[in-house]
Image (cartoon, helix red, strand yellow):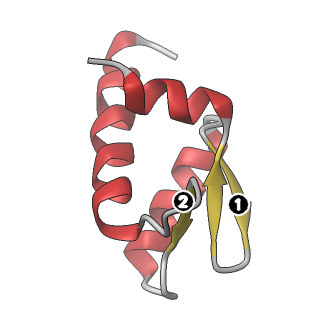
Amino acid sequence: MTPEERAILKALASKCLQYMDDGRNGLVHKSISAGEDAVEVLASFGLVKPEPEGGFWTDEGLRLLDED
């Protein structure tokens, strides 16, 4: 991914963590379309493993969240 994509994905991942965190390294989108779309985008870059109700952060996704 390009540096620009990484910056955008970092912002998206941070907002998902803020609003959809389920406390187990997972995300719950509560069937809200914006959350579903966000999980889909993060999954397409290998940052989230999608599940029916949301998803779980991959190791790469967790590393992205830990970056400064």
Q: Residue at x 37, y 57 (%)?
A: 16
**Would residue 51 appear left or right of 31 to someone viewing this image?**
right
| Front residue of 27 and 36 | 27
Which residue is the extreme one toward the front? 23
Work out which quarter of the rendered image holds the C terminus and state it. top left
Residue for badge 1: 50
Up/down of 46 relative to 5, above or below: below
Q: Is residue 25 left or right of residue 59?
A: left
Which image quadrant is residue 51 in? Answer: bottom right
Query: How many neighbours does mark 1 have within 10 angstroms: few (below 14), some (14-19), or many (20 or more)?
Result: many
Number of dots carrying numbers: 2
* Badge number at residue 39: 2
Q: Position of residue 50 (x, y in %)?
A: 70, 60
- In the rendered image, residue 65, in percent from the top left (x then y), is placed at 40, 33
Q: Amino acid at mark 2?
A: Val
Is tag 2's residue or tag 1's residue first in the polypeptide sequence?
Answer: 2
Q: Which amino acid type is marked by label 1?
A: Pro
